[in-house]
Every structure is written in C-alpha cells, then in structure tokens.
Amino acid sequence: ECPRWDAATERLLWVDIESRALHVFDPASGDDRSILFDDRVGAAAPTTAGDVLVALAGRLAVVDLGSESVRTLVEIPHGEGLRLNDGVCDPAGRLWVGSLALDFAPGQGALYRYSTGAGLDRVLDGCVPRHHDHGGPGLGRLELAHHVEARAVGQPPVGHDDVEDLGRGEHLECALGD
C-alpha cells in the first residue's frame, strides 16, 4: 500500500502494513528490498535529506536506507487499538497522516500534521474510515488509505487552503533536513 515515487533515487517506496515492512523497489534492477519493523507501517515518504519518513503504528520515524537505522521523530498521542495509516506530504514539506482503529470502528481516528519546525499537530478528531470506493466527500484531494472523511464528529472541516494541493500526483518530499 501507499506507493510513493522517490524521484531523487528513482525508486518506488511502498509498505506492507501487516507484514510490518517498508519496500524499496528499484525498477532498473528489479530489486525489491524489504526493511522490517517492530510494528505496522502505514506510510512512507522520501525526505529532502535522502532518508525515508515512515508512519509506524504509534510513532513517526526516519529510516536511513544505507544502515537501516531508525530514529523516532515523535510519538503519536493515541491509545492502544489505533495505528497510523496513510500519509502524504504537502507542498510545504509537512506530512499529513491519519490514524484509525484496528477494528475500523468509526470516529476513533484522527488527522495529524507534522513538520520539523512546528512538530506534531492533531488537526482533526473523530475521523471515520471509509471503504475503498474512492468516492464521496473526502479531504479535498487528500486521500488516506482506508480514506478518512472530513465529517468528523463535532469538528469543522479541515481548511481548504491546507489540503487543496495535496495528493495531486506530483513528486513531493517531506522537508526533514538535519
């Protein structure tokens, strides 16, 4: 799931959530390298520093593809029974990532925004996972795996300016330099 093209290295990043793996596929050689984690991996995105940002069940971390070392950036303040799911970087280099309940119970998830300078913000509570129909109202052009609807319980919709340019298919990297 969550395929992301890394234009700088000309490799495809994708995750296998239940196998807890980040895959790095090199189409030139046909090699599909797998890096295993101690928890589910919901999303991956290339960074401007050349590493890969991964959304693990309860934290955001950076993976050095050379050494396969993992450095935690931030713990996600959600309880047991939830995990991070899909995420995407916006043109400002911020990562937007959603969470959902392991049993897909409605209203348990949240939408987070992470940036190096500002840290982690919980933008929206009470998110509802949708089925994979790719239809109906969503977060503008932002699509998260098991898509999160903006119709959260008691919450205003996410600002259109924040999500307007997300997920248009152009190459976006998370701005996580040293």
Image: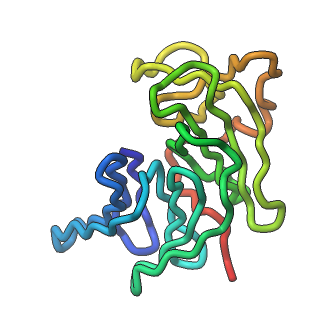
Left-right relation of 43 to 117:
left
Task: Depth check: give the residue in front, 85 or 170.
Answer: 85
Relative height, residue 96 to residue 151 (above, below)? below
The image's colouring method is rainbow
Left-right relation of 81 to 133:
right
Left-right relation of 11 to 168:
left
Question: x and y percent of residue 2 in the render?
Answer: 41, 46
Q: Residue at x 59, y 78 (%)?
A: 49
Left-right relation of 93 to 122:
left
Question: x and y percent of residue 150 in the render?
Answer: 68, 22
Question: x and y percent of residue 110 in the render?
Answer: 67, 35
Q: Residue at x 36, y 69 (%)?
A: 10
Q: Residue at x 50, y 45 (%)?
A: 169
Question: x and y percent of residue 31 in the render?
Answer: 18, 70
The extreme top residue here reads: 136
Q: Quadrant of residue 82?
A: top right
Q: Residue at x 76, y 54 (%)?
A: 120
**How many circles with numbers are drawn on the protein?**
0
Which quarter of the figure is the N terminus placed in?
Answer: top left
Task: Depth check: give the residue in front, 58 or 120.
Answer: 58
